[in-house]
Image: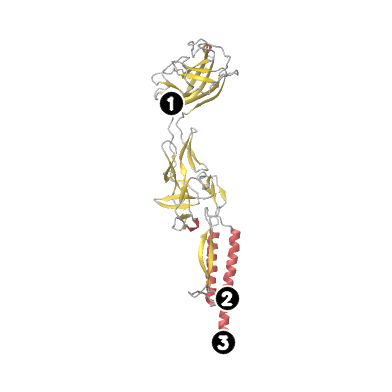
Amino acid sequence: MSFESALTGLKAASASLDVTGNNIANGQTHGFKQSRAEFADIFATSHLGVAQNAIGHGVRLTNVKQLFEQGQPEFTGKTLDMMVNGTGFFRMDNNGSISYTRAGNFDPDPDGYIVNPDGHRLTGYQMSPDGNVTNALGPMRINTGDIAPNATQNFRVSANMHAFAETLPAGAFDADDPNTYSYATTGSVFDSLGREHMIDFYFVKTDDPDENTWEVHTRLGGQEPDNSDPIHVQFDNNGMMVGISPAGVMPPDFTNADLQNVTFSTGPGSPLAGAADLDITGLDLRNMTQYGSSFSVSELAQDGFAAGQFTTVTVESDGTIFARYSNGQTDPLGQVALAKFPSPHNLQPHGNNAWLETFDSGQPILGAPESGDFGGLQAGALEQSNVNISEQLVKMITAQRSYQANAKMISTQDAITQELMNATR
């Protein structure tokens, strides 16, 4: 009987060495998760139970369990290297065949898709035409083309008008005569072709109808807007804006402070020649004040930009991937999707740092990084193997001793058997 028991011990020690050897071999494999051999004793039983003096029949391998503890980060500085800090797997698509991995060493392929070394595409949540993340899953792709220009539609002016500025007669404004306006400032806007133009704002404190009323005139490269009448702004005795009227509407018919519209038409002699009309539908003067301090401009902000060339890509901790362009603009390309499983240790290893879903693992639960208990993403880093080499060496020595002891048991039993055979001669 001890021959069979020792033989099962040899097999168990060999299996333990195989598992340990695989762990050590993958000590430098990114995203690798170590395994451990699990054993159970063998006992002969019957429907009547087991006798009190029954002896076991050895040991058997019951399971090779995967351990999904977090590996340490390896900082690479490469943008598309990604690491999951916490729970979750990257979801990979190989022509409809879905696999999961913790290894985030990705690169763009010739078509711009983000792929792993096996060419499997990283999947994530796609963007809608208006730039919002949707629930639609698909392959993540980098758009390396140029970004089209965007004509200015909104312009915000934040400035303080000196409360004790000299009042000027209404209607006497002349952009070429500094004596006909109180203050001026200049910003930039972009037309539909992405060309930059300078827009001038002139502020005139008027004595009609009261001392807290200002005219705001605009010019684009010297060109008047389609409606050359000024915008009127009124302040209360605390210096706060109380009303604004569109061009052509004179006080006291003020409305509540609102966005204004200024349009510059294209045509011969216009700086916009060749482009579409520049229609600034959101001229925002609501942050203007009239205090006793000197004239100052704190903000001139607009939303237009020139055409830009692709420069780089960045990945945020929530998995959002942005393309960045030479004009300073960013374009969201999608959001990386992560998957988690009710029983990840029952995933089927598939090789090449990948796992497959099984019935015992449960169905994947998908979500964005940093949502729920999903981990966040760290760009420029890779997850190292979670193998502890020192621990594996100790296990190797233990398995070796076990193998030697079981081999000794077989040789001892052989010697006893030989003695028994010699005694019967």
Circle 2 SS class? helix
**Residue at the bottom extreme?**
425
Label 2, label 3: how many angstroms apart (C-alpha)? 20 Å
Label 1, label 3: how many angstroms apart (C-alpha)? 108 Å
- Dot 1, how many residues are within 10 Å of its Cα: few (below 14), some (14-19), or many (20+)? many
Please state which amino acid type lies under the numbered disc 3. Answer: Asn
290 is higher (above) or lower (below) than 46: above
Q: Give the image location of residue 225, x and y in percent.
A: 43, 18
- Dot 2, how many residues are within 10 Å of its Cα: few (below 14), some (14-19), or many (20+)? some
Circle 1 SS class? loop
131 is higher (above) or lower (below) than 343: above
Q: Give the image location of residue 181, x and y in percent.
A: 52, 14
Q: Earlier in the sequence, mark 2 or mark 3?
A: 2
Q: Nearer the viewer, residue 129 or 107?
A: 129
Please state which amino acid type lies under the numbered disc 2. Answer: Met
Please state which amino acid type lies under the numbered disc 1. Answer: Asp
Residue receiving disc 3: 422
Disc number at residue 409? 2
Rendered image coloring scheme: secondary structure
Disc number at residue 268? none
Residue receiving disc 1: 191
Q: Give the image location of residue 107, x and y in percent.
A: 47, 46
Q: Nearer the viewer, residue 211 or 405?
A: 211
Do tag 2 and tag 3 residues touch (Cβ < 8 Å)? no
Circle 3 SS class? helix
Q: Residue at x 55, y 82 (%)?
A: 417
Q: Earlier in the sequence, mark 1 or mark 3?
A: 1
Quadrant of res 21: bottom right
Q: Give the image location of residue 379, x and y in percent.
A: 53, 44
Do tag 1 and tag 2 residues touch (Cβ < 8 Å)? no
Q: Residue at x 56, y 79 (%)?
A: 413
